Amino acid sequence: MKKMLKNYFMLAAALTLVMAMLCGCGNDNATGANDGAFTTVTEGKLIMATNAYFPPYEYYEGDAIVGIDAEVAQAIADKLGLELEIQDMEFGSIITAVQTGKVDMGLAGMTVTEERLQNVDFTTSYATGIQSVIVPEGSEITSVDDLAGHMIGVQLSTTGDIYATDDFGADYVEQYNKGADAVLALTQGKVDAVIIDNQPALSFVAANEGLVILDTEYAIEDYAACISKNNPELMEAVNTALEELIADGTIQGILDKYIKAE
Ligand code: GLN
């Protein structure tokens, strides 16, 4: 009897200890809507930086910024229980805005490159991009091999700009703030070709008479969202959300809505 009583007390003590540990853990975790797993610049918000002149990834419809990236970001924000805010800025300012903690992430048809990876981290890729070449109809440039020695228009700080400057030299590359400005210069004969991502290229060619896209591709790349290296918790949360959205077909549905099969 005595032994049984002793066992009973030991069991009760052990149970009390376990209960205390469980309660302790529970209290530590109760720090906010996402259990304190990640932080954003403004509580309850997911602030995305973009350059809204890149159809169909981001463009204005009235005052609203719409497009693939806006919808992908909205789907991520919904999964994380956050309100999405989109800030429009120069493409070349996006990485700095992410790095300096002014925004939570950049989503701008942005290509993952080794150089950018030194400054920011990239999520899982959600789309493929192609660098295309636009020329006037009847141009003597009929493939990417003909580009050398010609004036090439690009959008400042994009991969088109970086690769063209590497391949052909800065003297042959004219940088414009917007892709549309590079295309305008092409229609005015100020440059001989424009190197730009294929989806905006298709929009620009559709909107301007007398331009064609070369059949040969200049480069094939991965688009991803960039997030500060100082916020690995947000990176993990966004990646988890994005990977679920890829797996359940949501991302493909968004891409198909804006990019019609040829
Ligand atoms: N994909 C290109 C890059 O990342 C262009 C992106 C853009 O102009 N929005 O440089």
Image (cartoon, rainbow, N blue to C red):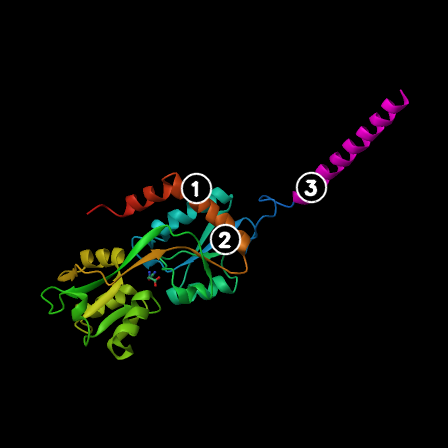
C-alpha gap between disc 3 and disc 1: 28 Å
Q: Given the image, on which type of amino acid does mark 3 rest?
A: Cys
Q: Is residue 29 magenta?
A: yes
Tell me if mark 1 has few (under 14), some (14-19) or many (20+) residues whose alpha carbon lies within 10 angstroms of its own: some
Q: Earlier in the sequence, mark 3 or mark 2?
A: 3
Where's the N terminus, which quadrant?
top right
C-alpha gap between disc 3 and disc 2: 24 Å
Q: Given the image, on which type of amino acid does mark 2 rest?
A: Met
Residue at 39% across / 43% down in the picture?
246
Q: Is mark 3 within 8 Å of ligand 1?
A: no
Q: Is 32 displayed left or right of 183 in the figure? A: right
Q: Earlier in the sequence, mark 3 or mark 1?
A: 3
Q: Is 222 displayed left or right of 37 in the figure? A: left
**Tags 3 and 1 in contact by the CB under 8 Å rule?**
no
Identify the residue under disc 3.
Answer: 25
Identify the residue under disc 1.
Answer: 244
Identify the residue under disc 2.
Answer: 235
Element under disc 2: helix
